[in-house]
Amino acid sequence: MKTTIITIIIALFALFPAFTSMSIIKTEKQKYSIVLKEKEFEIRFYPSTTIAIIQSNAKTYKELSGPGFRKLANYIFGGNESETKISMTSPVQMDINDSVSSMSFVMPSGYNVNNLPKPNDPEIKIINTTDEFVAAIEFGGFASDKDLKFYSEKLQKLLRDKGIKSYGHYRFLGYNPPFQLFGRRNEIIVSVNWK
C-alpha cells in the first residue's frame, strides 16, 4: 500500500511538468517579429493589437500582480456583459512606475474592440495598442521587484552601449501561469526609436 502511494506521487510529479508544458504550448502568444538579434537582447516589432487593461496606483510588482491579475482574469473568465469565456494569452504585461501603473492582457487574435464583450468591471478598458518597436531582454524564474530593477538597468546599459535610444517606461512581460515551476520566461521591454 505504501509503495503504491509513493508510486502515485512520483507519477504525479513526473506528469505535472508535461501537463503544464502542453497547456502553455496551446496558449496563444502575442505576435512580433525580430528585427535585430544581439547576444543579450533583441529589437522587435509589435503590430497593433487589442488589449484589456487596468490602471492602478501600485508602485511595485507585488502590489500590482495579484489584484491586477484577478480583475483581468475575472473579465476573461466570464465577468462581462455576455458572460463570454475568453482564452488566456501570453504574455501578461505590466507597466510599473511612480505615476500610474497598469496591467494588460492581450486579447486572442479573433477579437477586436468591436466584438469583445463589455467588462462588468468599469475599471477595465478595451483598447488598441499602436505599432511599436521595442528592445527586449529575457530572464527566468519567478519575477520580483529586484529582478525588474536589475534587468531594466541592464537593458538600459546595453542600449546605451549600442547607441539605441529608448523612451517611455520599462515594462515587464510574464509568459507563464503561476503554477508553472520550471522553464519560466520573463522579459523586460522598452520602446525604442528604430528606422
Image: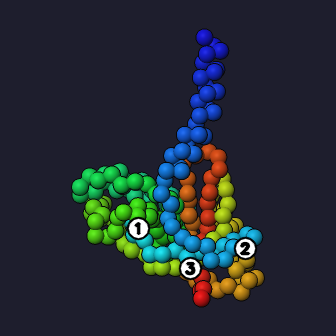
Name the residue located 27 percent from the left edge and 63 percent from the top edge: 118
Q: Residues within 10 Å of mark 3 (few under 14, many from 20)?
A: many
Q: Position of residue 140 (x, y in %)?
A: 67, 56
Three-letter amino acid code of the residue under disc 2? Glu
| Residue 133 falls in image quadrant | bottom right
Per the image, the residue denoted by label 3 is 133
Residue 46 or 13: which is nearer the viewer?
46
Per the image, the residue denoted by label 2 is 38
> Is disc 3 placed on a helix, strand or loop?
strand
Foreground mark, 2 or 1, reads 2
Q: Residues within 10 Å of mark 1 (few under 14, many from 20)?
A: many
| Quadrant of the snapshot with the N terminus | top right
**Residue sitting farthest toward the top:** 1
Q: Position of residue 74 (x, y in %)?
A: 36, 53
**Residue sitting farthest toward the bottom:** 195
Mark identifier at residue 51: 1
Tell me, yes or no, if residue 112 can be seen here: yes
| Quadrant of the snapshot with the C terminus | bottom right
> Is disc 2 placed on a helix, strand or loop?
loop
Three-letter amino acid code of the residue under disc 1? Ile
